Amino acid sequence: MTVTTDAPPTMPTSADEARLWSLIESAWAELGPEPLALRQALVERDPADEDDGPSYAIDDWLDPFLDRLGHLSAELTGPELTDLDRVVERKLHDIDREDIHEVTDGSDDGFLYCRGFIVALGRGYYEAVRADPAMALPDADCESMCYFFAHLHNERFGSWPETGSGISRESFGNPAGWSA
C-alpha cells in the first residue's frame, strides 16, 4: 500500500549546512597545507587565465579527502547522515544551472560529477562558482561526493535515505536554472 502525503518538502537546516561545510573543511585540514593551498588558489584564481593545469592538481587529493570524510562521519546516526545527504542534494540542485554547465560542459552524469567536485572543494569554492560560473573547471569530477552520505547510510543501515526534499540532484533537474 502506498501512502501519499501533502507534506511540504523538507529543507536542510542552517545547522545541517554548517555541519556539512565543517566536516568538509575538517577532512581537508587533516590532509595538511598542500591541498589547502591548492583549494585556496582555485578560489582566488583568475578564470580568464587559460592555464588551468595547476588547478587540476587537487585531483590527486580527492580520494584521500573522501577517505578522511568517511572517517569523520563514522559515528553519525542514520538521521544525521540523511540530514547531510539532504544538504548535499540541495547544494547540487542549486548549482544545476545552465550558466555553470556552459563552463563545465559534460553529459548528464558528467555535469553531476562536476557539481560534486564543486561541493567537495568546500564552501569557499562552492560560493565562488555560484557567484561566478567562470570559476568552475571544465571536466572536473568527484562522482563520490554526489551521493557520499547516502552511500554511507546504505552501507551502515541497509537503506537509502529518504530526504523528503522533493528535489533532484540529477543534472537538468532544477527548472529555475535552465532557460525554457
Image (cartoon, rainbow, N blue to C red):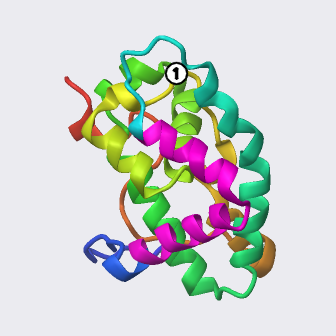
Answer with left or right where residue 139 lies relative to residue 46: right
- Coordinates of residue 158 in the picture (x, y in percent): 77, 76
Answer with left or right where residue 180 lies relative to residue 2: left
User: Magenta segment range?
Assistant: 17-43
Query: Is residue 56 visible in the rendered structure shown here?
Result: yes
Q: Quadrant of the C terminus?
A: top left
Say which of 96 and 139 sits in front: 139
Circle 1 Cα neighbour tier, 10 Å, few/some/many (<14 / 14–19 / ≥20): some
Q: Which residue occupies 40% across, 72% down?
A: 17
Q: Is residue 110 in the magenta section?
A: no
Query: Is residue 1 visible in the rendered structure shown here?
Result: no
Q: Which residue occupies 58% across, 29% down?
A: 55
Say which of 119 and 155 sits in front: 119
Q: What predominant SS class does the magenta segment belong to? A: helix
The answer to whether residue 51 is above or below residue 55 is above
Answer with left or right where residue 103 lies relative to residue 144: left
Element type at mark 1: loop
**Residue 155 position by quadrant:** bottom right
Q: Is residue 18 in the magenta section?
A: yes
- Coordinates of residue 154 in the picture (x, y in percent): 73, 70
- Coordinates of residue 32 in the picture (x, y in percent): 71, 60
Residue denoted by label 1: 138
- Coordinates of residue 174 in the picture (x, y in percent): 32, 41
* Residue found farthest to the top: 50
Mark 1 is on which residue type?
Pro
Q: Which residue occupies 42% across, 31% down?
A: 45
Q: Which residue occupies 57% across, 65% down?
A: 24
